[in-house]
Image (cartoon, helix red, strand yellow):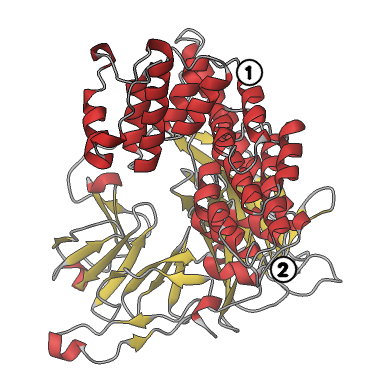
Amino acid sequence: MGQEDYYLELCDRPVHFEKANPVNCVFFDEANKQVFAVRSGGATGVVVKGPDDRNPISFRMEDKGEVKCIKFSLENKILAVQRTSKTVVLPEKRNLKLLKSQNINVNWYMYCPEGAVILLSTTVLGNVLQPFYFRAGTMSKLPKFEIELPAAPKSTKLSLSERDIAMATIYGQLYVLFLRHHSRTSNSTGAEVVLYHLPREGACKKMHILKLNRTGKFALNVVDNLVVVHHQDTETSVIFDIKLRGEFDGTVTFHHPVLPARSIQPYQIPVAGPAPVTSQSPIPCKLYSSSWIVFQPDIIISASQGYLWNLQVKLQPIVNLLPDKGRLMDFLLQRKECKMVILSVCSQMLSESDRATLPVIATVFDKLNHEYKKYLDAEQSYTTAVEAGPSRCSPLLKRPVRTQAVVDQSDMYTHVLSVFTEKKEMPHKFVIAVLMEYIRSLNQFQITVQHYLHELVIKTLVQHNLFYMLHQFLQYHVLSDSKPLACLLLSLESFYPPAHQLSLDMLKRLSTANDEIVEVLLSKHQVLAALRFIRGIGGHDNISARKFLDAAKQTEDNMLFYTIFRFFEQRNQRLRGNPNFTPGEHCEEHVAFFKQVFGDQALMRPTTF
């Protein structure tokens, strides 16, 4: 299997710790994401490492018996050690205060640090779960709920194990994930993962069922809002996305794996030791090992090898594994690091080898612009609220976050469309159809089209001499009026004479002042177009010669400079009977430059009658 086929990988910088052995015990703290390596009950040292810790914490403590559990408080301020089932010791003396107590018979518990929720397994079967929510030093009791077991248990012993339950935040909502090894319906074989939504207020509700279509040993992770299910027997994993459309039966939504099952990408463990020794080949890591322990949301620990990894999703391989472009976009738009992959998909569907149909291209553009519009609207609402002043402004008001799913016009222009229009092998009708499809999509979502997209359309039409089509696009306002567009049209007059009038009509519709039009044209180095425009409206007797000569000189086109210089000499002759410039016009520098390039004899001589 090629490297481009694996869509899951272990992070390349894992936390390395002393592997578990008879002398060294390993513990993991889910809240701080720290691994504790405790040697000889702590007497010969405790080493604490986390994914973000630059420097590991090392200390010793007295060996007072076997350590069952060891953790730091948040920010590593207080160390707690548990050696018996009923006592927790804080090595530093502190006053503890009982805030609240509950009397419940508990089989087992599970804590979710991200959601600050503890889940208690109660009743004889263990399938009635009681959640509590911690916030600002208070504990709130949430409504209890029952996990539906695969079938009515025959005995009255504990039927729900904590191994089959996980808690994770998916798309900002807290879920309880139940791995049900046999489906409740007789016609369905294989295990499934049932997702219960656990809100801060209101009852817990069964929302989603992930169909695994296989049996055996499973483990769950959540990565980038995807539920990853590892299957030990086949040494493969599958991913589920609850945001993608599933089959809704009126109560719950059933989901199937987004992609075919694949192994995690093979991983090499580097050989530690002195430099001459480390030149030997790295050791392949045994994936899906029975010694692996999985923690939420994305952690895999191999105690026997001494590694803690974060599981990661690779997006680029998914592009070729999910042929439905619409579904692929729905999937990618929900991922954190999606922008460059989305742009590569857009480029790919416009390539000669993988060319998509126009309806598919339209679907992709609409999905992108739907996200883009959502962000623009949120930004607009935020700006309006801020401008309204603090009295109307909610204290919870936050500026919308621009995620990578926001693919704007400049992204599309720079990375996709401008490159696409340069491809000589592409039929020009297809190129224009794609550009117009993108503009149609922007208009549909009421997003103002940037002038550079219109310019790209016009340049493409001109390149292929499709002036009739250009005329129609302008006549029926397919291309929106803008000053830069009008200037571009003026510059096309030498290729297509009607462009001059089309441009002037557009500028009149925009109520643009004539001198402003001249300034815009000169700034774009369209000196002749500016002169033609000013002559067209009869204002050429009053314009500044210096301004036009400055602009002509900046183009570094000597023949253009000659043409402009000669025009003003002729104007001087016509108005004053002498071609020379007056001192008040401040053109001495340009006269000197003209003489230097063309010689004194090229200057116009006064005409006498």
Q: Amino acid at mark 1?
A: Lys
Q: Which is closer to the viewer, label 2 or label 1?
A: 1
Residue furthest front as drawn: 609
Q: Is residue 2 left or right of residue 196?
A: left
Q: Secondary structure at mark 2?
A: loop
- Report x, y in % for residue 508: 63, 18
Which quadrant of the view contains residue 65? bottom left
Q: Quadrant of the N terminus?
A: bottom right
- Report x, y in % for residue 525: 42, 35
Q: Secondary structure at mark 1?
A: helix
Mark 1 lies on residue: 508
Viewer-side residue, 602 vs 14: 602
How far apart, in angstroms, are the residues tagged by discs 2 and 1? 87 Å
Q: Amino acid at mark 2?
A: Ser
Which quadrant of the view contains residue 450? top right
Mark 2 lies on residue: 155
Q: What residue is at 42 percent from the left and 29 percent from the top?
A: 522
Viewer-side residue, 115 vs 4: 4
Q: What residue is at 46 percent from the left and 9 percent from the top?
A: 389
Q: Quadrant of the C terminus?
A: top left
